[in-house]
Structure formats: C-alpha cells, structure tokens
C-alpha cells in the first residue's frame, strides 16, 4: 500500500493513504542502516499490520523530487516564508538566510509579510524595494482585514507548499484564515498522541484541495548558513545576475574588487543596500567557517 507521510513524531510516522485514512507506522531498521530518515512529504510503501487499528510499517521510501534540511520536508514545489511587518519587526538577515537556502535547493519562494494593518504605506514600500528583485513573489497580508489572503491562496493551488517562519509572526493565524478546516485533517493523529494540535512542534502536512498540500513547520529563530564556497555565494543572488558579467575581473565576488558593476549599481541605488549588507556578512561568515 502506498501513502504520504503527513506527520512524524517520536519515531512514529503518520501516513495518509486514500483507502485506509491515516495509518500509524514505524520505519523499518533498514533505513537506519542506510542512514536515510523518512520525512514529512515522503511518498512511501506501507506494510499494513492491523487494518482495524490502522497500524503498519514503512518498508520503502519512494524516490524524492527534492528535500529540505531546515525545515525537514520532502517533495516540495514551493516555500512560503512568513514574517511580520510590525511585531516582531522583520529580521531581514534571517529572511535572507532562508532565501539563500531555498535558492541553493532550487525551490521557488514566496515571501508573505503579515500584519499590514500595523504599519504605514511607506514601510511597506521600503520592504518591497528591498525584495522586488530577489526572485521571490511578494505577498502582503493581514488576518485582521483579510488583505492579500485571496492572492496568497491562489498561489498555493495545485502545489505542495511548505510554510515556514520565525515564532510569533502570525504564521498559524495566516494558515487558519487560509484553511479554517485544515485542523480536521489531523484529528486522528491528535487522538492517538493525546496532544493539542494548535502549537506547531513538528512539520505537518495538510490536504487542502485537489493536488494541493501545505506543510506547517515549527517556528525558527536562527538558521546556519548552508555548506557553500564563499566564491559561489554570489550565484544565488538574482539581483546580481544582470551585472556580474560586466565586472572588470572574471570571478569578481563584488566585495573589494575595482571595476565591480554590482557595487556600481549599488551606488546608483539600483540594488537594495540591506540585501547587499547581508550578502557581505554571509561572505565573511563563510570565510571564517572555512578558515577554522
């Protein structure tokens, strides 16, 4: 029997299969020997041990389209990262780390800036200017007024989307407004593990329509930079692409080199200063990691 892992907790995996509903599974020891861990979003082969109690074993993990390390999920079409515009103020360094991770893994990203009802038009314009050339779709939402919610909902249709973001930004509120009935999907799981389902402690997948899945993930407060050579970092900033072939030196990393067209564009305010400052910080961080 085949199904999809919709939640993993304490060594148990909850697999949704059309013919049975949710089956509580353990993973066979062979995966530990292969150093391969089942992930939420994995399509799996299940050996049913007790049909009435809905208990089984995962005996095979089917081929993954992709997988993310943080958050740990598989077979994702896009990521939506949610940050608040007001409280807590958006940590753009943290946001840029997330965008870098997704860009490296070739995952399309949308940025949802929530709580528009708490900020001014000028504040929204400033953050738009910072990210309009980043390659990410931008959405501005308010769960109070409903602004932007329908636009965001449309971008999810027919895709598997991972929702991520720091704690306290209103991620759960946005998801509740988008999918008021989604909690019903995990009723069986909550009953099995006797735990409330409103605080996200683990990655969790919901079916919200035909071929439409969303994965809610635990909030994060920090992200380590991915394993990367410092010279490669520039390749993951889409804003740099129109300029980097025009630099005086081949392999220019846009930090100290003369004749750098990225820095020229920056001085002409054609590129966002804050994104570039984070780029420089990441470059130095990677340099230090490699040194030690």
Image (cartoon, rainbow, N blue to C red):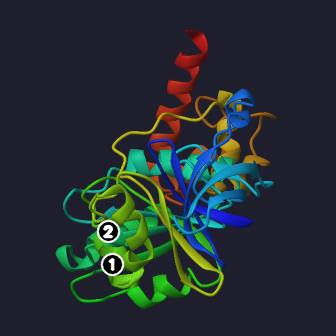
The residue that mark 1 highlights is 176
**Label annotation for residue 81:** none
User: Residue 179's x, y, as percent?
Assistant: 40, 83
Dividing the picture into quarters, in which one does residue 259 lie?
Answer: top right
CB contact under 8 Å: marks 2 and 1 = yes
Image quadrant where one finds the C terminus? top right
Q: Is 228 located above or below residue 274 in the figure?
A: above
Q: Is residue 134 visible?
A: no
Q: Is 247 located above or below residue 81 in the figure?
A: above
Residue neighbourhood size for the residue with mark 1, other residues' Cα within 10 Å, grouped as few (<14), some (14–19), many (≥20): some
Q: Is residue 273 visible?
A: yes
The residue that mark 2 highlights is 172
User: Residue 81's x, y, as percent?
Assistant: 45, 62
> In the figure, is residue 20 to the left or right of 182?
right
Dividing the picture into quarters, in which one does residue 84 lie?
Answer: bottom left
- Give the residue displayed 44% in from the left and 39% down from the top: 223
Q: What's the CA distance linking mark 2 and mark 1?
A: 6 Å
Q: Is 281 located above or below residue 43 in the figure?
A: above
- For label 2, the SS is helix
User: Residue 128's x, y, as percent?
Assistant: 42, 70
Q: Nearer the viewer, residue 126 or 19?
A: 19
User: Residue 233's x, y, as percent?
Assistant: 65, 38
Q: Is 168 located above or below residue 236 in the figure?
A: below
- Give the residue displayed 74% in from the left and 48% down from the top: 59
- For label 1, the SS is helix
Q: Nearer the viewer, residue 205 or 258?
A: 205
């Amino acid at each position: 029997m085949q199904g999809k892992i919709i939640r993993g907790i304490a060594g148990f995996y909850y697999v949704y299969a059309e013919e049975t509903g949710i089956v509580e599974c353990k993973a066979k020891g062979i995966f530990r020997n292969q150093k391969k861990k089942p992930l939420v979003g994995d399509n799996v082969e299940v050996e049913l041990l007790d049909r009435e109690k809905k208990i089984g074993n995962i005996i095979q993990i089917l081929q993954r389209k992709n997988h993310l390390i943080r958050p740990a999920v598989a077979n994702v079409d896009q990521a939506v990262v949610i940050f608040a515009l007001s409280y807590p103020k958006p940590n753009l360094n943290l946001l840029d780390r997330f965008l870098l991770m997704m860009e490296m893994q070739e995952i399309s990203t949308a940025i949802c800036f929530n709580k528009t009802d708490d900020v001014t038009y000028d504040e929204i314009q400033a953050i738009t200017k910072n990210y309009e050339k980043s390659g990410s779709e931008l959405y501005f939402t308010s769960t109070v007024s409903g602004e932007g919610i329908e636009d965001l909902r449309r971008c999810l249709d027919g895709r598997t989307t991972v929702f991520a973001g720091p704690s306290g930004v209103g991620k759960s509120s946005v998801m509740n407004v988008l999918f008021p009935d989604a909690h019903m999907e995990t009723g069986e799981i909550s009953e099995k593990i006797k735990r409330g389902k409103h605080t996200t402690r683990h990655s969790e997948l919901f079916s919200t329509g035909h071929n439409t899945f969303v994965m809610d993930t635990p909030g994060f407060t920090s992200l380590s930079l991915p394993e990367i050579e410092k010279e490669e970092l520039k390749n993951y900033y889409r804003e740099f692409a129109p300029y980097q072939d025009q630099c005086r030196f081949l392999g220019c990393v846009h930090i100290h080199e003369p004749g750098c067209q990225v820095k020229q564009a920056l001085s002409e305010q054609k590129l966002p200063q804050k994104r570039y400052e984070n780029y420089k910080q990441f470059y130095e961080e990677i340099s230090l990691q490699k040194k030690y």
